[in-house]
Image (cartoon, coloured by chain):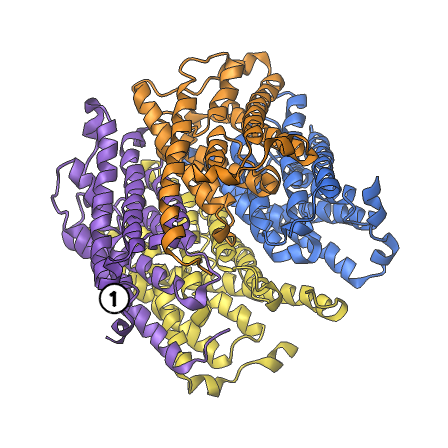
Chain colours: A yellow, B blue, C orange, D purple
Amino acid sequence: MSCFTKMPNSIADLKNVVFWRDVLVEVLGTGILLTWITFSFVTFNPDHYQPNTTTLGLFVGFLVFILIETLGPYSGCHMNPAVTLGFFLNGHLSIARSIFYVIAQCSGGAGGSALVYALTPASKRHMFHAITPSADVSLAQAIGHECIFTFLLVFTALFLTLPSRKSVNPGFPLGFCVGTSIMCGGTYSGSTLNPVVALGPAVISRNFHDHWVYWVGPLCGGVVAFLLFKAITVVGDKFEKPNN
Amino acid sequence: MSCFTKMPNSIADLKNVVFWRDVLVEVLGTGILLTWITFSFVTFNPDHYQPNTTTLGLFVGFLVFILIETLGPYSGCHMNPAVTLGFFLNGHLSIARSIFYVIAQCSGGAGGSALVYALTPASKRHMFHAITPSADVSLAQAIGHECIFTFLLVFTALFLTLPSRKSVNPGFPLGFCVGTSIMCGGTYSGSTLNPVVALGPAVISRNFHDHWVYWVGPLCGGVVAFLLFKAITVVGDKFEKPNN
Amino acid sequence: MSCFTKMPNSIADLKNVVFWRDVLVEVLGTGILLTWITFSFVTFNPDHYQPNTTTLGLFVGFLVFILIETLGPYSGCHMNPAVTLGFFLNGHLSIARSIFYVIAQCSGGAGGSALVYALTPASKRHMFHAITPSADVSLAQAIGHECIFTFLLVFTALFLTLPSRKSVNPGFPLGFCVGTSIMCGGTYSGSTLNPVVALGPAVISRNFHDHWVYWVGPLCGGVVAFLLFKAITVVGDKFEKPNN
Amino acid sequence: MSCFTKMPNSIADLKNVVFWRDVLVEVLGTGILLTWITFSFVTFNPDHYQPNTTTLGLFVGFLVFILIETLGPYSGCHMNPAVTLGFFLNGHLSIARSIFYVIAQCSGGAGGSALVYALTPASKRHMFHAITPSADVSLAQAIGHECIFTFLLVFTALFLTLPSRKSVNPGFPLGFCVGTSIMCGGTYSGSTLNPVVALGPAVISRNFHDHWVYWVGPLCGGVVAFLLFKAITVVGDKFEKPNN
């Protein structure tokens, strides 16, 4: 695919101190994200008129927005293998960077959840649980749901980082891509849109049942997003004059 | 009306690949909008302290915002025949573009709802229902409500796309024109502000009872918005020096 | 006070078509604001887990934001006699403009509420009621509350329209000055922050009991905001070099 | 530490009228913040389906955002000793300014709470209470929680005020750093992220039990944030070319 002709060089990346800084930033960003999300398992109380998916959507939306604003200028602050896959397919990242980003995200995510686990007394640890599709949802439906919802996230990420969109600040819309999906479908498959968001809680609750669903769904969504993004932008590149 | 003197040429549009790309983007945008909205029929649970119109207003507001940010630079991302009518009256669109946009919106909207229908098991499909005015609201009231609420949306859209407002990002205010209207009046007529938002659920629930209300109300709102917009801007064009 | 030396000329205003356009825009903006707010009296249902002040704060916040974005470049879109008083004291408005703005706001506000009243069937009109302090709040407390909360609104409005703040878009923070005050204290005095928001419902419910509270409180808040604004900016004007 | 080489001069500060204006702005900003927060103790009613931490997170988030927008260009509008500590460590503030800011924040905070206390009739004053960790949380957990949550706030503040981030408006993300932390963990330790937010209610309820927790936790968070900020930026300063 022509998009790989401009792919950055992996060897150059691995020799660069800035590359390793970016990998550690990715660990840190994903770690903060999973610390907050795992912590909410202990504090959310649906019996106290706490409107679960509304609050969760708002709080995760704002958190993703803040992290992209803060750490985005370093590593891009993907915090999500599906986003990294989308940018890799579009030629933004070298193979080495893509692989180390996913490793960093998994380590950071598991580490963030583990930090919360360690700080929680044994008597309350039963409140941690893996994110799983709700009882009446088939696995195919959960995968379809995660795929469709992650599609919008990666699709938006690809468009908002186009050079022609420099005036737009991508953090807020991207944060609320996640937020709106949680508000819309959080009670269905869990609306992780992100394998790592499922990984952290799975690690600390030692429950990997159906965990693969949260890898297959989001990654498929990332591929679909890339293909549709390419189809739309290729027309403009060929037939439009560059705007501005 | 003088605004039509600058109307783009329909024939030139139909011969242009970019025009057809824009039509497909309109199908895609409206399709995503209706996929999310239709999906929420299955996941929203008012018995679980889910504050219906608050969550719905926030989630649709953020979704419209994200779609305008992402796809707006291509087709304008109207996703709404009433908005297309407003821009057509103001001379932004050729006749061909207006007609194909409305066809695209209807196809995309029905397609988005149908996709959710197909992915939902037969046992849960009874949760889909057409959007209808609440029981104690007369048809005239529902039309008036849809007209007034859509008026604000199209009115805002016309002002925020004026060349003198280039510094303002229209996606966020337009998204929350929809969001605020749902929060204010969602339990009354449904606050669609958009014929296509009523069309998708009507198709999959095969219930077109009172469906025309959601065409007459919003389209009237679009016409009123255009007339008031024209009345305000015409004074400035004649008597003010251009600002900046 | 020196701020009046730069006050615009009233006679010049009254002869100008653009001035009368601005007055009509003020009627329209306040009319839309009161239409939405009055409408929410009929649709809000506290029995249905509708979290009153949260939803109300969000919906009014977004509405004020949208109206300032849309109509602000014409009349300033004050929609509030307390804001007009603050800008008059700071020398932005002629005497004629200030008087006609307040008349426009009262007409628009009463008109907006009356429109909703007319469109509501007689059987539901009992749902309209004047905004009054809650039962256990003394009048002095209600005035103090309205004064403190309106203070923040006018204070913010004066700072965000300073020439040195051109890069900041004042609509969103001003909208959520109102929104945050409603969320914080809506169940106390009503958190109108605006005499006209109390006037509209008072007119249609023909209940002017304690109505003066909503004039005295907000207008005092506007005066206090101006005095503190002046105290802070005068130091910078005298002792700082102009920034940028 | 090298960051202190560029530290402003304390003596020059103390002789400057603008410095004392900034200190008074800090009193005013923290005073407004605590007035609103303390007021919400009287108006929030969890029995009335008021979703406590959601509403509180939204209302405090918007309030912090508005205050930073309005007063930030004068004193920086820290309103928080932990933020002042972070900026002091990074060399933004002289020793004198740091000390007087903390004194100003404590005075403003206590004053804001006292104002609300004075305006509340004796019969309702029992509703005021100190912010304390919830019953089943150990002090170590509460400190850890306050430390982790304040870390994100100060971390974000340090990055968003970097000269290379001039295009970003820090008020909104910083406000919602506080907002998202309240939504996530408000029912746990109280999520003050700020010693002064605990100080005001402690003063008026004369209850300083465990109050030190809200000084140790946030100040530790500020130090950790500074160290991680330094570790990330030092790599870029040494190995990257300046962007833009």
The answer to whether residue D115 is left or right of residue C124 is left
Between residues A197 and C14, which one lies in front from this camera angle? Answer: C14
C74 up-or-down from A128: above or below: above
Give the quadrant of the N terminus of chain D.
bottom left
Q: Quadrant of residue C53?
A: top left
- Label 1 sits on a secondary structure element that is loop
Residue at 55 percent across and 65 percent down: it is A222
Front-most of residues B219 and A139: B219
Residue D205 placed where, x, y %? Answer: 16, 35
Q: Is residue A147 visible?
A: yes
Q: Residue furthest right?
A: B11
Q: Residue at x 48, y 26 (%)?
A: C44
Residue at left offset 38%, top offset 26%: C217
Q: Position of residue D50 (x, y in %)?
A: 35, 33
Instruction: Look at the picture and state if C35 lies above or below D35.
Output: above
Badge 1: chain ID = D
The residue pinned by badge 1 equals D9
Q: Residues within 10 Å of mark 1 (few under 14, many from 20)?
A: few
Determine whether, in the image, residue C38 is placed left or right of residue C137.
right
Q: Quadrant of residue C216?
A: top left
Residue type for callout 1: Asn
Residue nearest the observer in this picture, B16 or C206: C206
Please count the marks in the image.
1
**In the image shown, does C218 or C111 lie closer to the viewer?**
C218
In percent of width and height, residue A135 lies at: 43, 47
Res. A212 visible in picture: no
Residue B141 pos. (x, y %)? 64, 22
